[in-house]
Image: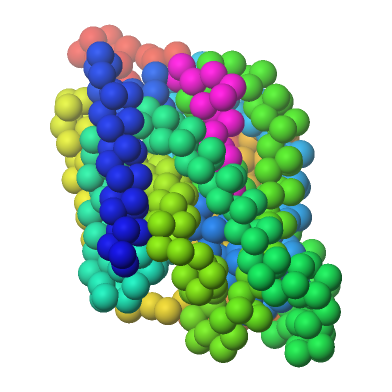
Amino acid sequence: MTSVPLVIIALSIAVAFVLALWSRAHKRMDLEQWAVAGRGFGALFVFLLLAGEIYTTFTFLGGSGWAYGTGGPAAYILAYGAVAYVLSYFLLPPIWRYAKERNLLSQPDFFTAQFDSRFLGALVAVVGVIALVPYLQSQMTGLGLIVQMASYGRLPEAWAIAIAMLVLALYVTLSGVHGTAWTAVLKDLAILAVVVAVGILLPARVGGLHAMFTSIAHLRPGFLQLGAKGMGVLWFISTVALTGLGFYMWPHAFGAVYTAKHERVFRRNATFLPLYQLILLFVFFAGFAAILIVPGLKNSNLALLAAVQHVFPAWAVGVIGGAGVLTAMVPGSLMLMTAGTLVAENLYRPLRPSATSAEIQTVARVVVWMVAAITFLFSIHSNAAIVALLLMGYNFVTQFFPTVFLCVWRRAWVTLPGAVCGILAGVLLVAYFALTDHAIVAGLNSGFLALVANFLVTLVVSAATRSWEARREGQRNAPAQTDPASGFEV
């Protein structure tokens, strides 16, 4: 009977692979089709790709795990998405127009084109890949936990994560963004049903929502308030700001913007995506119920899965696990594919200008497997909470926001040296805080402090180098002169 969940999860993975192979039929899978679907996605697919950023294993396991482990501070997850969607209404259309005019493929291409600097593009690519590793680690950790749960502990964690890594890497290699989009349709239908069901049935098991919160407040006074582990009001505000501004700075989310047919897609999505935030309440309800159903877990990531195993029959565990697998495959595949594209397009191609499109695509697929292997090694040697991994990634990618913001609305205010120095200042501060284990500084999220420093450095250095930028622009736009003796341009 305990093999039933594994069978159901295997069937879910098989369906995802069938969708991946079907989606690529009759398509010439060059790098543009593989990475941005030929820029042909309508409102539904772009909606689902961007919604894939919301419903990942971070939400499925991390959100419930943080509700289980930290209580009140988990509420930031409800707030930051709404901030991001308001911003997307104004930010994404001009980014899409700029990318469409220049046939951009990746996030670093945007920076390269804005400043005519391959160095800046390479810097953005390196930081982007670094930021994707902890986010990918959270997806693989979640996938591994689900597979381990489905085996009722018979499968060791390392083997479960290895299986997750192989599934993701193979899926990306075969499908590209077309398969991810079609799987996102299946994922969203499954996860919405599962999250609502779990969020209702688990609290019902402990007497309903009122009884659940009353019991938690009695057992852990202050647990449902801000302030746990230093996560007070200032931390909440700075974390919502950091993650809201950084939401579309992830390389895979930025690249997903390029797949749209028209800019109207983003304004429609900004209207409806906030509704998804309401469903997150059910994730929190499940995590809070787990406090009473399976108290004392050392690994808060296991809260939802342990409660599900305790309450539901084996077949239901399989259905819930299958939905959870899909929540990791959609964003995980986007991240791996993006990492491959960043390295191939923005690091390898500049070093080898003569490379053919087929060679670039091969490099991208090889990098997918390399990044998957690196992430696997990090995953098996870390017990970090899924939410903590995501916040670490956010600290890095949000450092792109000042330059993107200024490029879209005040291009004259930012120069190439300003952009480079700002990003480096932010990234180095993030690395320093991470190495010294300072997630909170003066009550604020340390990544937010790095973002503020980034903004200031960008503006100050840009102001100091504006004349240099003007001379550079003039030299770049000046007509070429010909040496009369040789006939060559000089």
Magenta highlight range: 39-55
Residue shown at the point (49%, 81%) measured from the top left: 299
Residues 152 and 167: in front is: 152
Query: Per the image, is 53 magenta?
Result: yes
The picture places residue 92, in percent across and down from the top left corner, at: 64, 31
Residue 474 appears in the figure: no
The picture places residue 260, in percent across and down from the top left corner, at: 53, 22
- In the displayed structure, does residue 458 sit left or right of residue 186? right
Residue 38 appears in the figure: yes
Q: How is the image coloured?
A: rainbow
- In the displayed structure, does residue 355 sit left or right of residue 179? left
- In the displayed structure, does residue 146 sit left or right of residue 231? left
Residue shown at the point (39%, 23%) measured from the top left: 37
Quadrant assignment for the C terminus = top left
Q: How many marks?
A: 0
Q: Which corner quadrant of the image does residue 202 belong to?
A: bottom right
The picture places residue 450, in percent across and down from the top left corner, at: 64, 65
Residues 457 and 173: in front is: 173
The picture places residue 252, in percent across and down from the top left corner, at: 46, 42
Asked if residue 190 is positioned above or below residue 372 in the image, the reply reads above
Residues 38 and 189: in front is: 189
Q: Which corner quadrant of the image does residue 119 belong to?
A: top left
Asked if residue 394 is positioned above or below residue 149 in the image, the reply reads above
Quadrant assignment for the N terminus = bottom left
Residue shown at the point (29%, 24%) measured from the top left: 22
